Amino acid sequence: MPFCIKCGRELLPNAKFCHRCGTTVKPAVKPTPVTPPVMPPPYKSPIAETYYEMVLKPAAEEKLAGPRVKHREAPTKPFEERAR
Ligand SMILES: [Zn+2]
């Protein structure tokens, strides 16, 4: 049952206006709700967790603790070049 938006009076389903306060009743068409895109439930993979524990967490801790190594040595040969 629709209700008057102004006085809260219960209205007839096909009422054009509230018979109590006279407020125009919007047609009983459901306003299209802005539905957020259906997202898949977040999947927490154990691999990702391990990756976080092994790579991201130490890196974050290192960042917090301050850079221990001032200058990181670049690998002598990048992987791509080695593959050639
Ligand atoms: Zn009303």
Image (cartoon, helix red, strand yellow):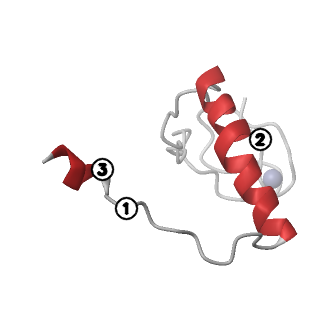
Residue indicated by mark 2? 3
Question: Where residue 38 sits: x, y (%)?
Answer: 50, 33
The quadrant holding residue 21 is: bottom right
Above or below — where is 48 with respect to 35? above
Residue at image point 77% right, 48% down: 4
Seen from the viewer's position, the closer of residues 67 and 64 is: 67
SS state under label 3: helix
| Image location of residue 63, percent across then percent down | 76, 67
Separation of residues labelled 1 and 2 (CA atoms): 74 Å
Q: Quadrant of residue 60?
A: bottom right
Could you tell which of marks 2 and 3 lies nearer the N-terminus? 2
Q: Is residue 27 left or right of residue 23?
A: left
Identify residue type, mark 1.
Thr
Q: Nearer the viewer, mark 1 or mark 2?
A: 1
Q: How many marks?
A: 3
Mark 2 lies on a secondary structure that is loop
The N terminus, quarter of image:
top right
Specify whether 20 is left or right of 42: right
Question: Residue 58: horizontal and vertical position, in percent?
Answer: 75, 50
Q: Secondary structure at mark 1?
A: loop
